[in-house]
Image (spheres, rainbow, N blue to C red):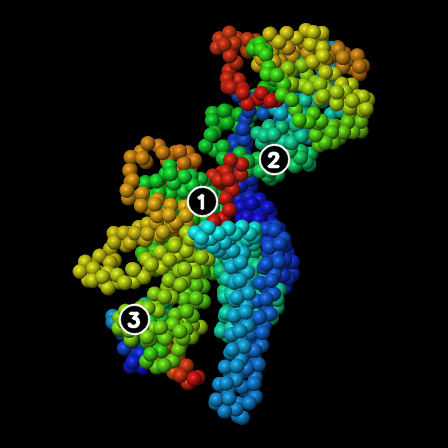
Amino acid sequence: MRKKKIISFVILILVIVTLALLLQKLLMPKYMTKIVEGALIAEYYDEKNKNHDVIFIGDCEVYENLSPITLWEEYGITSYIRGSAQQLIWHSYYILEDTLKYEKPDVVVFSVLSMMYDTPQKEAYNRMSIDGLPLSLTKMKLAKASMLPEEDLITYIFPLLRFHSRWNELSEEDFKYWFKKDQIAHNGYLMRVDVKPASSFPKPRKLADYKFGDICYEYLDKIVKLCKDNDIELVLLKAPSLYPHWYEEWDSQIVDYAEKNGLLYINMLNHLDEIGLDFNTDTYDAGLHLNLSGAEKSSVFLGRILQTEFNLSDKRQDKYLKAVWKEKADAYYEMEADQYRELEEYGYLLKFNMKRSEENNQ
Amino acid sequence: MLFTSYGFILFLCVVIGLYYIIPKRFQWQLLLISSFVFYYFSGWSNLIYILVTIVSTYFIGMKLGNLNKQQNLYLKENKETLSREEKKAYKERIKAKRWRWLLFCLFFNLGILAVIKYTNFAIANINNIFTLFKMNELSFVNLIQPMGISFYTFKTMGYIIDVYRVKYEPERNIGKLALFVSFFPQLIQGPISRFDDLSLSLFKEHDFNAKSFSFGFQRVLWGYFKKLVIADRIVVAVLEITRNPETYDGIFVLVGMVFYAIQLYADFTGGIDITIGIAQMLGIEVKENFNRPYFSKSIVEYWRRWHITMGTWFRDYIFYPLSVCKPMLNISKSSRKRFGEQIGKKVPVYLSTMTVWFTTGLWHGASWNFVVWGLLNGFVILVSQEFEPLYAKFHQRFNVRDTFGFRLFQVIRTFLLMSSLRILDCYRDVGISFRMFGSMFTKFNINEMLTGSLLKLGLDISDYIVLLIGVIVLISISLIQRSGSVREKISGKPAIIRYTVYVLLLFSIVIFGAYGIGFDSNQFIYNQF
Amino acid sequence: MKALLEILEELHPEIDFETHKSLIDDKILDSFDIITIIAEVNDEYDVAIPAHEITPENFNSASALYELIERLMDED
């Protein structure tokens, strides 16, 4: 009798846990259409071939502006972009820490735009940068560092407690991608082929204080140390997006920091002509982000620097890698063709059929 | 720490785990420490207040007990030698001493409560008078009200009066008294337990008992269901209506009234379910505070079934003593002489009733809203008392007293009456409350409900569906309860049905609970009382 | 005892107070009745029933109440 009771109790617990996990998977946002950048962080962990020369960390300035496929095709460099929407510097640090559990790249490129934020901005971006990580101590430390006052750490262990109220907004998408998601990026690059020429931007506002926050420097120091401890070359990068405005005062701080720490700092805004960027054709949202053609141009430029500076070998003759990247490139070109077809047919891209006004700041 | 915070649930798991691991003789001490830890989280300065109350009550209780012992001993030893008059005189002396100690304890502790709770209310009223005479206004003081002070103060006052009345011996162990006063599950919102009710099981050693543990756990879940799924959801609409009286008058007042009745019931009884459930998981019996109050057929019955421990507290420690004290008996005598038997006999009843309801109102909150609310309750009770002969005649003539229809009418009438009184609980001041009540009759327009305006109160259609189902579940459970414990009934069913019920309850809280980002986490309504 | 029964019967003529043993438990006497009784008892017997003697045991039957009155008269 007693034994029977214990068995049924164990079954009860198992049922509860299973149900909780199923519901959690169902209720969490899928990020398969519209805000697809929410799916980026998780996608890395499905990558079979986690062995890259270069890892990029940062916000949309990396995942929209650089294409690993181009880096491979032009230079035989293997790379992955661990980007996420409005990735703040503590996100970048812990995401890098987590990445290093899987692989040791030769070079890490950090996008410095996020130095401008020294406080968490929006809960939604925390979720996009953190939920994709597998449960680990790193993830908990990341959540603790990122949380807004109204957030609870436990919701990063059990996201069901955060997303339970989505029950009344479940859509077809949630059921379709309940167990299996599509791949939406190409080694972390989010492709857009549409074009929206850059017009004039409002004159940059004068800031009261240009100095980056102490906390940002603290994390930048931590990133430097993490790379040093792992024998990784760190590169600081300002990608060629026209907005948000990259102030002179900010630039010189990064220049100083790079010099002091013996780091390479590349401000691509200083090389727009050399890159060959034309903001009439190379951006999909008037200069905030680059489109495919812009990203490919940027990658050609950046790849050359990385290869010469750090002697990255050309791996295009490696049989195994060749096959892996062939497959990746096929998917890449297929998506490119699809997007052009959609543009032709509808005049816009289906996946992104939504006002993107919320992302102006990334 | 709120019952609905993640921190509290973690705290609870740790306490309950430890409770059944440590040697049983330390169990009550663990509860004492836990209660203070719990209280510490609500602000360490709060600890000072509760400690002062515990220490003063303890020592005065001991003093009262010792004086009583001294008296008994003296009378026994000198039984032969003392005359009847001498004995009487000695008794009077001791009685006077004990009375002074009791008064000191009451004034001291109620004084703390009064200063903290009513200083700003007093200042506001003084300022109103000052402005009348064009004098400078006083500034308000910034006093933080310690959590649950009304509840624990009333607990200790009940204890000290009982000791004075020699209902029981004072507690000799200050730790045990401290646990009685601060027992964490009932610290925030009661029930206002009596020492002789609670102490037996509170200080006993408890073996783990699977049945009472799981019954307690079910009760806790049920409490969270009421609180999170119903109360914290409907509160959005209640606040929208009551904070914007200019926009929402007429029929909306009725809607707000009914919604608030649902919210208050779900919130308060849910909180008490959590309290009693936690105690039960620990093997401790806490007296019930509610008995399906909304099924009451009269306002007197309602107050016997709603917030029972508060009602009986006021009855035993204010209403009765006040009604039977010498001055009141003299008033009774003289008024009977003056106004005649029929009316004169009612004077003490009227006086005591209105006093009790005045204090009850004041206890609920430091504002005229609550004072008026309390007085109106007393008024309605007295009026219905006066109508008693009329009702009797009605029932002689029409034999409907026991028909279902008439009982239903009585239940609905009582519900609406109590809900109307609670309007005072919702609006900013007494004037607006009365105006809103009036607008229900002058501006009542049913069409306003047909244009989708319910969806503009901050709840969408899915919220209303959840609420509707929740309320149906609530009513069904209450109906089933009339013939005995629901948990007993469920425990008699096969395992598969039992488990399905638990799983459904658990997940309906997790999924449909109005908690987390996007929902304001609401404090229990009775928290600050 | 006779005077007490008169007091009680005036309040609730329908009850047979000589035999009824659960006046409180059956909710026949409410708190208003109780304080009316105490006031009249005070008049009739010149004895004050203190608040702490208001217990179900003392008020459940007329005989119990009478015992209480006798005890209090004795103590005086």
- The image shows residue B21 at horizontal and vertical percentages of 64, 56
Q: Position of residue B70 (x, y in %)?
A: 57, 81
Q: Chain of mark 3?
A: B
Marks 3/2 same chain: no
In this view, B245 is above or below A46? below
Type of amino acid at the residue the image marks with label 3: Gly
Q: Residue at x 25, y 71 (%)?
A: C13
Neighbourhood count class around disc 2 (C-alpha, 10 Å): few under 14, some 14–19, many 20 upward: some
The amino acid sitting under disc 1 is Ala
Horizontally, residue A66 falls left or right of residue B161, namely: right
In three-dimensional space, the C-alpha distance between marks 1 and 3, rounded to whole angstroms, equals: 46 Å
Residue B524 in the image: state x and y as whole percent.
Answer: 49, 48
At horizontal 49% and vertical 85% (from top left) the residue drawn is: B88
SS at badge 2: loop
Which residue bears the numbered disc 2?
Answer: A148
Pointer 3: what residue?
Answer: B344
Residue B186 percent coordinates (x, y):
52, 56
* Discs 2 and 1 lie in a common subunit: no
SS at circle 1: helix
Determine which residue is flagged by label 1.
Answer: B231
